[in-house]
Image (cartoon, grey):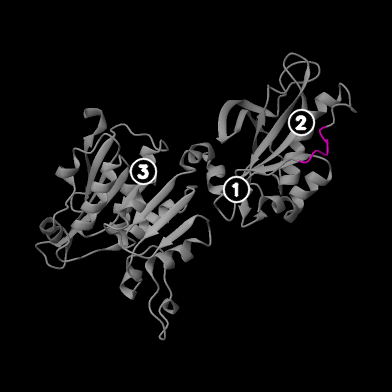
Amino acid sequence: MSASLISRNPDLQRLRDEGFAVEVRSGHVIVHDVWYVTPGGSVDRGSVVSPLQLNGDRTQPPSDHIAYFIGQAPCRKAGGALSGVINQHAERSLAEGLRVQFMLSNKPSAGYPDYYSKMKRYVEMINAEARAVDPARFDARTFRQVGLDDDESVFLYVDTASSRSGITASVARLRQQRIAIVGLGGTGGHVLDYIAKAPVAEIHLFDGDRFHQHNAFRAPGATGPDTWPADAHAPMKVDFFAQRYGVMRRGLVAHAYRITHANVHELHDFDVVFICVDRGDVRKLIIDSLVARQRSFIDVGMHVKRAHDPLQLLGTCRVTAGVPGHYDHLARRVPTADAETDNLYGENIQICELNAMNALLAVFKWKKLAGFLADELGELNSTFSTSFNKVTSSEELEAS
């Protein structure tokens, strides 16, 4: 994808055609080999970086005038900082392997219509001082070809949401993970919706049921009536979701069967397993097997019942995590006996917003365990109540 991204966009291709060493990486456009005068008066090479605004594989006008610089503070030939260009010293990681040192700010009255005008303006303002030293030797137009790295991305188009927000380096903590979701009912479908937008390497879907019409009213997004042709069976849930999310990412693997004693070992090699089942015996089977292997997992459950007013509902949802060395709380928090499960899911009332809330809490916990979200409590169990509008946390790791 990225190898052709520059050639598909006239503004990026024009930069390359004029000799600038252009690279697209992790949702950013970078111009390398920008000669500049250092604070010590010598000449060195740096890079100018800007978040890349895309619609599909087509560049859009830059959302702002801000850019970044990799290197020391660019200075004038005569000495002194390059005022009108350097905004502030702002060392930070924009993405994995992309660490900048300075924020640049120079806004024309009409703004920047494209990335050719934006990148060239910053490059020329910085490079002009080095060219004043030796115009032939210190020209930023090196005609060097720079490799593009996004071909290895799991996404079928560039994640510009992360680069635009400046969190690409944080998101990189989620890469290379292999995730399993067991159960693609209401909550499991929403878990997938959030996980699919993270750069995890693989997402394995386990469910032996078909996607029927009632499932559409609990699943994320909208489902058209052509999902259930009159002359065919309803699709398997795992195939339905793999196809739906396959339009944006790779790494989706469908397993159209239920977890049993014969195949529970298939869950042993995942970084995290999301357990989204409504049968206590299956939940117990999975948890026991993962605990024996010291694996991490997140179990979800919800309970909806009628209030005193029979037209009103009361809902609670629970998220319980198990991590290596911390499993003692499971017996207190996770219902696994059939009697407990019958009580928890007795009427089988489910509403999509509570499914989504259950999934959100589960994904929050996963992102905390992965180091993406800060975690002050280290809780392994959380419950949410609709009537009290409150999340309660317990079983903190710090207290273990």
* Residue 250 percent across, percent down from the top left: 53, 56
Inspect the image, locate mark 2, and give the three-letter code of the amino acid beneath it: Val
**Number of residues whose C-alpha sits closer than 10 Å to that of mark 2, classed few (under 14), some (14–19) or many (20 or more):** many
Q: Which mark is residue 362?
A: none
Position of residue 372 relative to residue 232, above or below, is above
Position of residue 117 relative to residue 342, above or below, is above
Gap in angstroms between the C-alphas marked 1 and 3: 24 Å
Q: Work out which quarter of the rendered image holds the N terminus and state it.
A: bottom right
Q: Is residue 199 magenta?
A: no
**Number of residues whose C-alpha sits closer than 10 Å to that of mark 3, classed few (under 14), some (14–19) or many (20 or more):** many
**Dot placed on the residue nearer the N-terminal end, 1 or 2:** 2
**Dot placed on the residue nearer the N-terminal end, 2 or 3:** 2
Q: From this viewpoint, is residue 390 visible?
A: no
Question: What span is colored magenta in the figure?
Answer: 140-145
Q: In this view, does 88 lie to the left or right of 220?
A: right
Inspect the image, locate mark 3, and give the three-letter code of the amino acid beneath it: Trp
Q: Work out which quarter of the rendered image holds the C terminus and state it.
A: top left
Q: Is residue 315 left or right of residue 169?
A: left
Foreground label between 2 and 3: 3
Q: Quadrant of residue 220?
A: bottom left
Pick out the residue farthest to the right: 136
For label 3, the residue is 366
For label 1, the residue is 152
Q: Residue, x 65% and y 39% (percent of image)?
A: 50
Q: Is residue 261 left or right of residue 331?
A: right
For label 2, the residue is 34
Work out whether residue 178 or residue 363 is closer to the camera in this orientation and state it: 178
* Residue 83 percent across, percent down from the top left: 71, 24
* Helix, strand or loop under label 3: helix
Gap in angstroms between the C-alphas marked 2 and 3: 41 Å
Gap in angstroms between the C-alphas marked 1 and 2: 27 Å
Work out whether residue 252 or residue 68 is closer to the camera in this orientation and state it: 252
